[in-house]
Amino acid sequence: MWTKILSAAAALASLPLALAFNNPPGVDIWCGKAYRASNASFNPGGWFEKPSYSPSPLLNLKVRPRMSIYLDTDTAGSLLIDTSISHLVGDPLPIHTSTSYSSQRLHLNIHILTEDGDLVATISNHSLPLNATNTEIPLPFNNLTPHLTPYTITTIASLSNTTTTVTTTSELYYLPHRTDGGSATRIDHRYGSLSYLRGSSTTWTPIFPYTYYVQWSLYWDTNTSTLPTFASAGYNVIHIVPTGTLSDTPFPWSQFTPYLTLADTLNLHLQYDVLWDPTNLTAMIDQVSHIHTHPSLLLYYTGDEPDGKSNPLNSTKIAYDTLRRLDPYHPTSLALNCKNFYYEEYASGADIILSDVYPVATNTSWSTVYDTPCNATYGCCGCDDCEGRFEDISSRIDQFHSFDDLLGWEKVHWGAPQAFGNETFWTRYPTAEEEVVMIMLSINHGAMGIVMWDYPSSEEIERVTRELAPVVTGEEMVGFLVGADRERGVVNGAERVDVAVWVSGGKALVSILNLNYEGVEAEVKVVLAGGLGVKKLECVLWGGEGWRVEGGELVSDGLGGLEVSILVVELE
């Protein structure tokens, strides 16, 4: 079987890469833009194009498995269905439905087909209202045979009292449980969270990845004792950046295997870097053939800032499709650096997108390295199209989420906060307070994992990230992050205070961030979304000094500069 898989993957890897683009001959570019003083500005292109507004309502129907993969040992599965009304994407609806959504229903016939198009199961008799999201219906497995290639889910929806029908398709992976000792990782498309199982276990364990990028030549290659030291600090994933002796041929297995073996005993998971050179997929296939059965493998990492480097536009997708053929048991990630440069093309090559936005201690309008201005069409300042504010982080993740909604695909986003300084564009390291703000701001805006760049960092940053580790990876907080919808809170009495709320089981996790360096001396109130009232403050996970409950609201007499509070409250 593995021989056949390798053959199919090799065929994918042999697809031609798209040609280099954008830059005139001899002009260096980053995010498609010239950045040297000797070169003139030009339009880099690649901006995401928002669909034109439709005056008539559109049905944006989505039907997809809740989990990215199911195994034949799973006792139950489900589909998530959106029947959203949009004026940007979707299929035309009869105009009269724009004023009568509540009286209209969609009747669904869902067919599951093999890769060859043979019908194996039908799910019918489901009727849903218009403009509903994340409706969950059972997905029976009785007629499915587990195999390594996906089934196709085809849904035909008919609108009541009309002749309107809409068809949509998605993929379903129903895989055999592993017998080779390897792990499996899946994405919950409802919340964007990860869970894993290892070996013969049939129990999925949720995880919120929290770690650093760590360069081999700067830390790991000292000796294997670096692993228990790293794990003891509370980090639950290792991302080994292949530098130094590994940069040309990652990874020499005789040298690397002792690290893998020790990682198993420490419950450290691997975000495995397989594609240091996007033109060398043969090397990637060789690595996957070695690593795909390893019990510590959590996910793959295929590209580091391919958009910044202007790698061929189809390179990430070729790598992704190759990996899915080689190993459907693990998702794929990559990091994007640009604010808005061929997002669709590059992001198509991963399930998980990391945003490395580095706004601290840098000049975002003038390049101190290249002595040029930085703007939407010219220059490189280390943080693409940034303002040098914490909000650069949240606006980037929010923007990518909005792109995803318009593209109609399921992507997960992680944060890659800045944990470095005293180099190139950045005049100093972030402070401990700045680091916590960047981590939690990423989480407040939907990041479902944190991988900081990079380790070792300053003593101050390492201390505070160790202190934060048991909070963001702990059972209390992770229970909310992986199993509850995220909402925005309303703040009265202060500007630039960011609040996110996760509600589950009569309780809520509330994360409150003061993005101002100055304190707030006035009374500040936080109101939960949806008319929810706070009954009492149950526990403080981080910070929290001075918060109390009054009239169903969280109230504080003031906030310290860059103050972060992570609270669990009981709801009325």
Image (cartoon, rainbow, N blue to C red):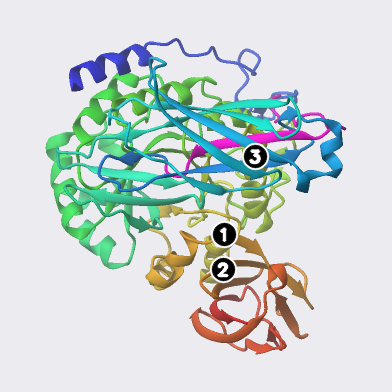
Q: Earlier in the sequence, mark 2 or mark 1?
A: 1
Q: Give the main secondary structure of the magenta stretch.
A: loop
Left or right: residue 290 compared with residue 283: left
Amino acid type, callout 1 = Asp
Q: Verify CB contact (< 8 Å) between mark 2 and mark 1.
A: yes
Q: Name above or below for residue 469 compared with residue 214.
A: below
Q: Name above or below for residue 481 compared with residue 314.
A: below
Q: Earlier in the sequence, mark 2 or mark 3?
A: 3
Check disc 1 and report its element: helix, strand or loop. loop
**Can residue 384 be seen?**
no
> Of 451 and 137, which appears nearest the observer?
137
* Residue receiving disc 3: 405
Left or right: residue 85 compared with residue 222: right
Q: Which mark is residue 485?
A: 1
Distance CA(mark 2)–CA(mark 3): 23 Å
Q: Quadrant of residue 563?
A: bottom right
Kindly identify the residue that appears in the image at 22 percent across and 39 percent down: 177
**Residue 217 in the image: x percent, y percent?**
29, 45
**Residue 57 in the image: x percent, y percent?**
81, 35
Distance CA(mark 2)–CA(mark 1): 7 Å
Q: Name above or below for residue 485 compared with residue 375.
A: below
Q: Which mark is residue 408?
A: none
Q: Which residues are magenta?
A: 45-67
Q: Quadrant of residue 325?
A: top left
**Residue 418 in the image: x percent, y percent?**
52, 55
Magenta stretch holds residue 1: no
Amino acid type, callout 3 = Asp
